[in-house]
Image: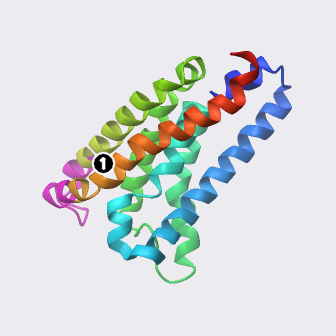
């Protein structure tokens, strides 16, 4: 969506890159801060239920498109791990990190595939988020199935966590598209 807005406004390539870098950095920062706030307010169970790191990644996909959003998706858990490790409690935990990198990269790529469609019609944000969630969670589950002999997870354990996180996914199915539709209304209003 953002690329289409910038092209329509005839923004230079240098400025487009600057906008996308700043947006990406802001979303990665939000993906580190938001889980901390949720964990402070609701503890670890709140994080497992609400899945706060997913929200900025899904926003990034819808806004930035797949090419830029994959960086947001892949780096969000890595940056969070690096920063929180310095304070003693890594989030996500190291064994979960590679699985989350893959999962969130898929979230970003799939939602990013809809970016141009969202520019044309904001309601495309709904299928973008739903399909990204389904694909990302499926990838996580498949990776656990493949690597369960060397990972500290089992398919039933992850399936249970997926069921626990349905609240967060449901909130995101509504919240992310509404946010994207709102941003689209602001960014596209002068040339709709």
Foreground of the two, 12 or 164: 164
Q: How is the image coloured?
A: rainbow
Q: Residue at x 36, y 68 (%)?
A: 46
- In the image: residue 6, left or right of residue 110: right
Residue placed under numbered mark 1 in the picture: 140
| Helix, strand or loop status at disc 1 | helix
Q: Main secondary structure of the magenta part?
A: helix
Report the quarter where the N terminus lies.
top right
User: Quick check: is 153 in the magenta stretch?
Assistant: yes
Foreground of the two, 117 or 136: 117
Q: Residue at x 24, y 48 (%)?
A: 141
> How many numbered marks does the figure carry?
1
* Residue 113 image offset from top left, x and y in percent: 49, 26
- In the image: residue 25, left or right of residue 94: right
- The local crowd at label 1, few if under 14, some if 14 to 19, many if 20 or more residues have their Cα within 10 Å, is many
Q: Write down the region rendered in magenta.
A: 143-160
**Toward which corner of the image does residue 29 lie, by quadrant?**
bottom right
């Amino acid at each position: 969506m953002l690329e289409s807005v910038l092209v329509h406004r005839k923004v230079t390539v240098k400025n487009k890159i600057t906008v996308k870098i700043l947006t990406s950095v802001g979303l990665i920062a939000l993906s580190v801060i938001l889980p901390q706030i949720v964990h402070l307010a609701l503890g670890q169970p709140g994080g497992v239920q609400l899945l706060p790191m997913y929200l900025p990644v899904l926003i990034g996909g819808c806004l930035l498109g797949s090419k830029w959003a994959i960086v947001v998706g892949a780096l969000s858990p890595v940056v969070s791990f690096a920063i929180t490790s310095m304070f003693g409690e890594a989030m996500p935990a190291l064994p979960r990190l590679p699985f989350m990198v893959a999962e969130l990269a898929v979230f970003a790529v799939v939602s990013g595939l809809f970016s141009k469609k969202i520019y044309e019609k904001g309601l495309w944000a709904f299928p973008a988020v739903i399909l990204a969630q389904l694909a990302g969670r499926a990838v996580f589950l498949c990776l656990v199935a493949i690597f369960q002999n060397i990972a500290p997870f089992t398919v039933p354990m992850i399936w249970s966590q997926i069921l626990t996180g349905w609240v967060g996914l449901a909130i995101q199915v509504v919240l992310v598209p509404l946010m994207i539709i709102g941003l689209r209304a602001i960014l596209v209003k002068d040339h709709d």
